[in-house]
Image (cartoon, rainbow, N blue to C red):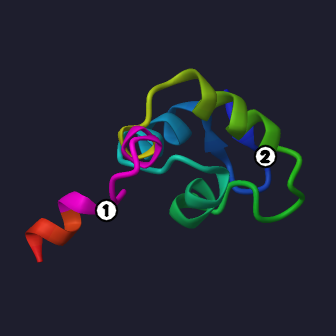
Amino acid sequence: MYVCSCFGVTEQQVKKHAADGACTPRQIASACKAGTDCGSCVRRIQAILGRGACPRRELADQGQPMLAELDEAA
């Protein structure tokens, strides 16, 4: 099912980007442009993101750096 008609982004694509670490609609937009044209899909994106666990959000809630794994690789 399409979440973003403007850019043809599906719910599965949003879930894939979320699994890859995109925890906010803005991060989803950076990954695939969904939500950057008319904006009507932003609430659907928020609902999809709210259903699953986000490892980076969990780190932030614990007061830890969200990009810790990237810092270690550098």
Rendering coords of residue 4 (x, y %): 74, 45
Residue at the outermost bottom position: 74
Rendering coords of residue 63 (x, y %): 40, 50
Please indicate whether residue 28 sits to the left or right of residue 59 in the image: right
Rendering coords of residue 5 (x, y %): 78, 46
* Quadrant containing the C terminus in the rendered view: bottom left
The CA span between labels 1 and 2 is 24 Å
Q: Magenta span covers which residues?
A: 58-69
State how many labels appear: 2
Residue at the outermost front position: 63
Q: Quadrant of residue 16?
A: top left
Rendering coords of residue 6 (x, y %): 79, 55
* Quadrant containing the N terminus in the rendered view: top right
The residue that mark 1 highlights is 67
In the depicted structure, whether residue 52 falls above or below residue 57: above
Front residue of 36/21: it is 21
Residue type pointed to by label 2: Val
The residue that mark 2 highlights is 42
Please indicate whether residue 16 sits to the left or right of residue 43 in the image: left
